[in-house]
Every structure is written in structure tokens, then in C-alpha cells.
Amino acid sequence: MNIVALATAHGVGSISIVRLSGNDAYTLAKKLCKKELKPRYAHLLNLYDKENNFLDEAIVIYYKAPFSFTGEDVVEFQTHGGLVVANLIIDELLSIGARAANPGEFSKRAFINGKMDMLKAESIQAIINAKSEGAARILARVMSGDLAKFVEDLRQDIIKILAYTETCIDYADDDLPSDILDNAKLMLVHASNALEKIVDISNSKRGLIDGYKVAIIGKPNVGKSSILNSLLHYERAIISDTAGTTRDTIEEQIKVGSHLVRIIDTAGIRAADEEIEKIGIEYSKRAANEADIVVCVFDGSQKSSKEDEDILALASNLDKKIIFVLNKSDLEFKFDLGIKGISISAKDDATLLKKELEDYLDSQDISDIMLSSNRQILACQNANSAIKRSLDLLDASQLELFAYELNLVIKEIGSITKPVENSDLLDAMFSNFCLGK
């Protein structure tokens, strides 16, 4: 079946690209072009519908199978920008035998036809959605094969251990080198440590890909909403001297240096009796727990209170980056908790806070390879669990069960690059991809 979709983003631009793939893609394209197409050559041609009405002048490129993105015949039409002309071409192709592509269907066909493994496919999708330049660099390394090499080296080590084990099982009555199983145990411990490290790195740096979440917390009336408005450069949150004005979390996305960041303004945290305010406070605490960075705000113009001490205790128990802000620096300083933080007047300027965020985000190490999807992280976690079970079985000399666990490890690690080709599974995985990709 031939599939067609718009491969560029919706909206007005200089060009729009319509992508067509399938066994009959070349034949269908010729019906619009009225000319023969030379593979991998940019043709400037007029396009016509089946009634010979002029559609557009476009650059047409034909990629002959198997030398294409999908491994099938692919034709791309580079039309004038905007949706109208592109949709005319898509509608014409639909009327003569193509069908609309599902999200991710081009990538799915590339995977099925051996043009890419799952690791590369997921990295392509992740790089499209990357929220920082650092993420783009990490994912470029993944696409170039660094992660694939890590996976394959690990898989080969486990296969080698399994071969040792099968030898011990098959020749149990013969004299074998006594250090075989000892060496296997050392290799497994090394593999387990490697899996734990890459999972930890990937979890800690998910913000590079998904975008870091920054929660602003503090007691009521310390200026949290003013900080949000100052960072956004417009009045997003209502500001009032009345305590408890902010009842729910407010989320906005801003650019901090080369990073896209989600800023979350929260309700003031204090002891409250009103049910709605209590719910808002619970949301604030949850936002702090889920955030990658917490901005802890205090009113520098007031002496500290029990509520400030509670906020400080909450922040101290969070295992993440904490930035302390002493707001209202335009007023006389009276705060007495001895906190070293950034002094700002949010109603005037929050540049110092933004600079602190940028410096921290820029300091994140991007030299390590990382996993680009939750599926890959889960596969590594499952593999590591099987390794740990296998070590217990090895200590108990249960070699048959030990070998069974090693086979599970190999299966989980292998699924990172080549999952089982179950149709429903692949549909679910590629459905999250962009339309036209």
C-alpha cells in the first residue's frame, strides 16, 4: 500500500514537503508530473491533477528502492509553502491510489525494511522533540551509534557468559578451569554496574530531552507569582497582597539560554483550614517533588516565621537542585534564617535568577551516553533485575536456572535495538511519532 503525508510542520513557510512511499509511488508520482523521474535528481516540474488542471510548480525527487528512507520507492514533492497547495497534491494522490499515512508509519516501514533499528528510530523522534542544544548533541551521538555499541558490547558479554555456563552444564563431569564461573560472576557484576549507571544518567538528564521542570515554592505573599511574571515578561499570574491568591499551579514554558524550561508557580505553602486552599498546597508539594529544580522563595523584608522554617525543611529533604531566592530586595533586609541565596526584587527584575538557572543547566554533563525513551530505560532495568537474580542462582550453583535468567537478560538488552516484531506492539510504539515521519 502506498502512503502519503505532509512531512513539514503545519503553517505558512517557504516550502512544504509531501512525502509518498510504496511499491507504486513512482507510478503515482508520474501521473502528477507527466514525466519520467531520474532517481536522486531534483526535477523542477509542473504538477497536474487527473483532469489536467495545474496544481503547482514543485521540485520532485525520486528515491528508488531500496535506497530510500523507508526502503521502498519514495517520492518527495517540495511545493510552495502553506497548507492549501500541499493538501491539493495530497488529495490528488489519495484519489489515484495512495492512502493517508498514520503517525510514524514512514519510520515503521524503515524499521521493518531494515533501514534503521528501533534505537535510531526513537532517537530521531527524541531529537525532534529535544528541549535543549545539549539534548540534540547527546541524541546525535546515539544516532551515530554510540549507544548501539554499548548495547551490543553488553549483549556479547552476556552471550559469552551463557556459553561458559552451557559448557559447565554439558561437561559437568569433566575437569574444567575452576575460574570460569568466577570470571562469569565478575563480568555480570560489571554489566550490572554499567546498566545501573546508564539508567541513573538517563533518569537524571531526562530534562535535557523533555524539558526541565522548575517549581517555585514558598509561603504566601513572598512574591512567587511576581517572579513568574518577571521571568515571562508579562502578567501571567494574578498578584495581590491577599494571602492565598494563587490556589492552583500555573505552568508556562520559557527559554533559558539554549534550554526550554517549564516554570511552575505554586500556591503558598502554610497551615490552612479552607479545603480548596489545602488542595492547592498539596499540589504545590507534589510540584516540588516532581520538579527537576526547585526555586525556594523567602521575603527578605520580613523576619523569618515558622512557615519559612517549614519551607526550608521541605527543601532540605528534596534530592535535587535547590535555588534560594530572597525577594523584595528594594526594601530593608530583615530576614534572619541565615540562608545564602539570590537577592532580587521580582517586581523590577529577575535577571539574576534566570542567570542562575542558565548556569546550572549549562553545567549539566553531556559527555555520557543516555537512553532516549522510557522503553529503553525499562528494558535496562529488567535486564539488570535478571542479572541480580542470576547472581543469586550462581552462588547457589543452580546453573540451569542461571542460564534461563541470562537468556532473559539477552532478550531485554536486544529489545533496545530490535524488539519483537509484534504488529500491535510496533503500532503502539510508532504511533507517538510525528505524522509524515
Image (cartoon, rainbow, N blue to C red):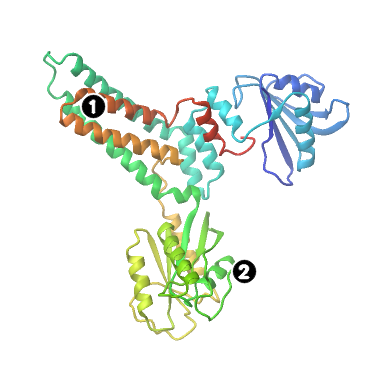
Q: Residue at x 80, y 28 (%)?
A: 45
For the residue labelled by badge 1, is the local secondary structure a helix, a strand or a loop? helix
Residue 313 x, y percent position in the rendering: 33, 69
Q: Residue at x 36, y 42 (%)?
A: 199
Q: Is residue 340 in view from this perspective?
A: no
The picture quadrant where one finds residue 181 is: top left
Residue 73, compared with residue 287, is above or below; it is: above
Residue 253, compared with residue 1, is above or below; it is: below
Give the alpha-carbon distance from disc 2 to disc 1, as whole Å: 62 Å
Q: Which mark is residue 237?
A: none
For mark 1, does the 10 Å Cα neighbourhood hold few (<14), some (14 to 19), or many (20 or more) residues?
many
Q: Residue at x 39, y 39 (%)?
A: 378
Q: Residue at x 44, y 41 (%)?
A: 374
| Mark toward the viewer: 2 or 1 | 1
Depth check: give the residue in front, 287 or 30.
Answer: 287
For the residue labelled by badge 2, is the local secondary structure a helix, a strand or a loop? loop
Amino acid at pointer 2: Tyr
Depth check: give the residue in front, 247 or 211.
Answer: 247
Residue 406 x, y percent position in the rendering: 29, 27
In contact (CB < 8 Å): disc 2 and disc 1: no
Q: Which mark is residue 234?
A: 2
For mark 2, does the 10 Å Cα neighbourhood hold few (<14), some (14 to 19), or many (20 or more) residues?
few
Q: Residue furthest bottom?
A: 332
Q: Is residue 7 in view from this perspective?
A: yes
Q: Which mark is residue 402?
A: 1
Sequence-wise, the earlier of marks 2 and 1 is 2
Residue 19 x, y percent position in the rendering: 68, 31
Amino acid at pointer 1: Phe
